[in-house]
Image (spheres, rainbow, N blue to C red):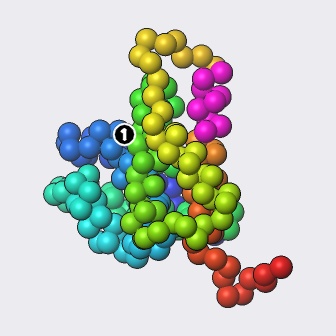
Amino acid sequence: MTVPALPDFERTVRLSQGNLDAAELAECHGLLCGLLCRETSQTASDFMQHLRAMQLLVNPASGLQAVMEEAFEATRRQLEDEEFGFALWLPDDDESLEARTISLAQWCSGFLAGLASGGQLEALSDESKEAIDDLQQIGRAELSSGEEENEADETAYAEIVEYVRVVALMMREDFRGPASDEAIH
């Protein structure tokens, strides 16, 4: 099964006509992923209602609404992909490391908000609880402006993005539990 790609990130920021910056768009996607992991958002309409409730996207123009609905469907299908084709919706690598780090931090904050919208998290495994603590730390990440970006920072950023991606997939499995046709050992 081929999973759909997420809409172009930068184009979506432009479509928002100043209503969303890159970090806020990343937060919207994090929220969506958290909602889908908790299965508290079954439709694109549910997702849009959550965005309004959090005042992230209150009255989107029809073009932006359509792109967000496309992002909902693509993300839902990516999370279901058995080949782990899930991707975080973040700014492209040509953006500054600082901008990407801020967006990743906002993605994590949105993800945690989406997870929390489904109620208590006490039933999670110890590994998942530890991962939530990690995401909270990443959600507070920032770079000091003026620091020179280097290859080691880029590598660290890429590793953190991959870790967050894997955590999201792990959370989905934790909340979903085994499918009816999966053997439990």
| Position of residue 135 in the picture relative to residue 24 (left or right) | right
Residue 28 visible? The answer is: yes
Residue 84 visible? The answer is: no
- The percent coordinates of residue 11 (x first, y second) are 34, 43
Up the image or down, 62 lies above or below 94; here it is below
Front in this rendered view, residue 57 or 9: 57
- The percent coordinates of residue 106 (x first, y second) are 41, 43
Q: Pointer 1: residues within 10 angstroms few (<14), some, or many (20+)?
A: many
In the rendered structure, which segment of residues is drawn in magenta?
Answer: 152-160
Front in this rendered view, residue 73 or 111: 111
Up the image or down, 57 lies above or below 37; here it is above
**Quadrant the N terminus occupies:** bottom right
User: Which residue corresponds to mark 1?
Assistant: 23
Image quadrant in which you'd find residue 19: top left
**Quadrant the C terminus occupies:** bottom right
Q: Residue at x 64, y 45 (%)?
A: 163
Q: Residue at x 26, y 67 (%)?
A: 49
In the rendered structure, does residue 109 fall within the stretch colored magenta?
no
Q: Main secondary structure of the magenta part?
A: helix
Image quadrant in which you'd find residue 182: bottom right
